[in-house]
Amino acid sequence: MSISSKTIAFTGGGTAGHVFPAFPVMERVRKAGIDVFWIGSSNGMEKSLVELAGIRYFGVPSGKLRRYFSFRNLTDLFRIAAGFFASLRVLRREKPMAVISKGGFVTVPPVAAARLLKIPSLTHESDVDPGLATRLNLKLGARALLSYEKSMTYLSPSKRKGAVIVGNPVRDAIINGNPAEGRRLAGLDPNDKRPLILVLGGSQGAREVNNLVTGCLDNILSIAAVVHQTGPGNPSRPDSDGYTSRPFFLEELPHLLAAADLAVSRSGAGSVWELAATGTPAIFIPLRDATRGDQLLNASMADETGMSVTLEKGADAEKLGNLVEELISDPRRRRIMGDAASAYPAKEAADRIAAVLMEYAT
């Protein structure tokens, strides 16, 4: 097929972490005169995020391949097949010069369609170890873009040849947050000198994180203020002096990250790299159950740099509270942790990926 040199297709979805890192990359290729569009699931959370950013969006059916027995694996095969043919129609019409996956099962049909149409494809992996969707995309011929040098060890020799270490991009807004505005959003006036703790469970929230924080909240509030992202549909404690909760932070997040003295967070790739970009010391509570262990690896890598401490498995609210108190009472240690975050090339990642994409411009 005839391929346009003026368009790149992005695909990804399922979580905000599969969407937000693509935004700064899209901004850079658009400045170079290249149009972009997004292929995502018909009813996924990514649709509203992408459209809000003013990006053309094409929804396709999507399914999920689960690592356990489920009849839904069978029915989802039909959805995946439908997603392939829908992607095929989109790519034939739009004729992009390349397709880049940002993660999630919705990306496999577009990458498969790209292979059939002989459109170059790339797949960016945010975690240390490639997830199933990334591995499937690699089998379909996609070129690997990796966030960590260690990720190379998970690739076959043939896939390492074209792979590039680029890091994991964060939105430019994240880097440009205003600490004073963040404290205002937290309900703190300029004369309030309490340290600020930001609690993040990921874009969907995390019941474990919420329960642990709630269990020691009274003790934490005696030494610091707390801003808590609970996740949509999760119950929260009413706002009070020094405590503010919301289901999800979007435009507010850059300012809250800039203002936070400490974060308590899941260790999804997006959270780790955003905290690294803002130099925010962190206590990580990895998702351990019903997962391949990617968050554990992410947390371990961050701990090795010195930017974070991971809460041990089985730790209760009291242990979390003690760890928070230990770090809040030691500003010097938190400064060292914040400085250690510079080991992550979060600010350069978008430029690196955009440079790779420009290789496909004709």
Image (cartoon, rainbow, N blue to C red):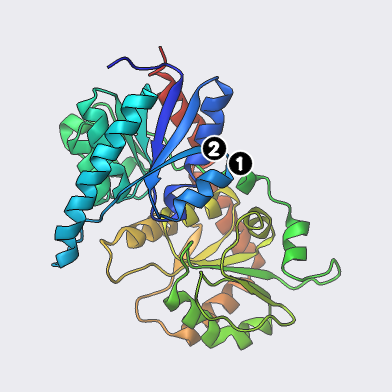
Q: How crowded is mark 1: few (under 14 residues within 10 Å), some or many (20 or more)?
A: some
The percent coordinates of residue 275 (x first, y second) are: 54, 55
> Farthest residue in the top direction?
362
In the image, taking residue 88 as reference, residue 49 lies left or right, namely right
State if disc 1 and disc 2 touch (CB < 8 Å).
yes
Above or below — where is 71 with respect to 112?
below
Q: What's the mark number on residue 291?
A: none
Q: How crowded is mark 2: few (under 14 residues within 10 Å), some or many (20 or more)?
A: many
Residue under the point 69% across and 60% down: 259
**SS label for mark 2:** helix
Q: Is residue 29 or residue 73 the one in the foreground?
A: 73
Quadrant of the drawing holding the N terminus: top left
User: Which residue was labeled with disc 1?
Assistant: 172
Above or below — where is 296 with respect to 240?
above
User: Is any part of residue 153 visible from this angle?
Assistant: no
The percent coordinates of residue 334 (x first, y second) are: 60, 63
In the image, taking residue 192 as reference, residue 277 lies left or right, namely left
- Of mark 2 and mark 1, the one earlier in the sequence is 2
Q: Quadrant of residue 236?
A: bottom right
User: Which residue was labeled with disc 2?
Assistant: 24
- The number of discs equals 2
**SS label for mark 1:** helix
Q: Which amino acid does label 2 sit on?
A: Pro
User: Is any part of residue 52 visible from this angle?
Assistant: yes
Residue under the point 50% across and 74% down: 233
